[in-house]
Image: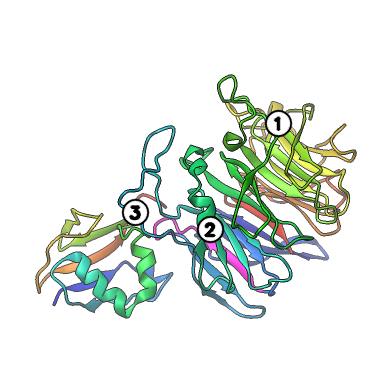
Amino acid sequence: MTLLVGTRKGLFELERGRRGWEIEHTHFLGEPVNSAVVGHDGATYAALGTGHFGSHLWRREPGSKWAEVGAPAFPDRPADATDVSPMTQDPWPWTVQLMWTLENGPTTRPNELWCGTVPGGLFRSHDRGASWELVRSLWDMPERTQWFGGGYDWPGIHSISVDPRSPDTMLIAISCGGAWITDDSGATWAPTQGMRNEYMPPGEEFTPIVQDPHRVARCAAVPDVIWNQHHNGVFRSIDGGRNWTEITERPPAVFGFAVAAHPTDPNTAWFVPAIKDEMRIPVNGKLVVSRTTDGGKSFDVFGDGLPSEHAYDLIYRHSLDVDATGDALAMGSTTGSLWISEDAGEHWATVSANLPPIHFTRFY
Amino acid sequence: MPTISFTANLRRHVDCPAASVEGNTVAECLAAYFETHPQVRSYVLDEQAKIRRHVAVFVGSEQLTDPTTQSDLVDASTKITVMQALSGG
């Protein structure tokens, strides 16, 4: 088993040896690596941010070196475009600022890749990243102009989840633009229902298209079950994300960014709580992981092996991952700490406390 | 002919040798360069053909005045230098 850790200053590849998890390979040292995925084709894809020279996608064939391929790019902004930020009235940029998430298409289409960007573009490649097209059906929706930034100045698509039973059904989630489902491979989109926000004026709490799901994660074996760490709470769906039910109690706090869904048990998921949005640090400076094994009715809080005082690590939305067995979890923080648990989150071991800020962790 | 050269920092990412190019404006010179080195374009320009936010272009010793359309005039002796801004790192 291998772990990819993307950071502000490079991509690290870790493997488990006799002495535990160690960094075996370093790639793109000095460059922001914002997402990576191992494709159904066996190749590894890495989204580089390069602080100065734009976003670029690199592919590594098994046993080969990295080579640059195509990258998502917006078309020309029409001269008569009227899309502006609802908050600032600034024109939407039709330029990729961040390739926020890379995901595979269905296993039946191994050449298909998806990319969610800031600003909120969804891009698809049919040819293993060589070329990309903007999904205009989503981008051209009037509702898109009501989305607004969360964390970044512009809204972004951070979660893309293909339904493994139905290759044309996919859920995406946007900060801040709600979650949307397509059943026809992106031709049409429907907003999902049931999320509740606390940051909009009275009457707008349940408006689907201004929700801020920080991250959604699907149970691979029971794809109707999807977990949602929202800006002000936790939600769960048992119908593939079409409807969400709020889980109001999640110790020690309901705020957080990351969620990992157990690959086979639909009642088990992990979260990393934090003090809500005005602080965004662990409660009492103590980093913990909350796990439910009963569908969100109750949670156990684990901190063994994690810093218990003066810890200001934030676990960002792509930085908690679980392996295919459900036993190993990898967690990386904004302050460059990396921990791994091999007993389903109950105990943690520090792999490094000195990495660059961690953007994502991903097992393959 | 005007010449165009690139910071060594960019050569870490993409092959971008210095070259002499035809053109009366910086935009024409860049376009001529990208014809022979198309892979360099997306490192310097964004999708709307604007100079990237953290890329600095000098026309001789002066900074480019029109990063949106690069209409700054050049002549046969002009040296265009594409640098990395100190911001954005």
Percent x, y of residue A329: 78, 51
Circle 1 or circle 2, nearest the eye: 2
Residue type marked 3: Pro
Q: Are marks 3 and 1 on the same chain?
A: yes
In the rendered view of the protein, which quadrant contains the N terminus of chain A?
A: bottom right
Q: Which residue is mark 2?
A: A135
The reply to whether residue A208 is visible in this rendering is yes
Parent chain of label 1: A
In the rendered view of the protein, which quadrant contains the C terminus of chain A?
A: bottom right
Pointer 1: residues within 10 angstroms few (<14), some, or many (20+)?
A: many
Pointer 2: residues within 10 angstroms few (<14), some, or many (20+)?
A: some
Percent x, y of residue A23: 68, 63
* In magenta stretch: residue A49: yes
Residue found 24% across the figure and 55% down from its top = B67
Q: Which mark is residue A296?
A: none
Residue type marked 2: Val
Asked which quadrant contains residue B77, the reply is bottom left
Circle 3 or circle 1, nearest the eye: 3
- Mark 3 or mark 1: which comes first in sequence? 3
SS at badge 3: loop
Foreground: B47 or A27? B47
The stretch in magenta equals A43-54
The reply to whether residue A306 is visible in this rendering is no
- Mark 3 or mark 2: which comes first in sequence? 3
Q: Which residue is mark 3?
A: A78
Q: Which residue is mark 1?
A: A233
- Residue at mark 3 to residue at mark 1: CA–CA distance: 38 Å
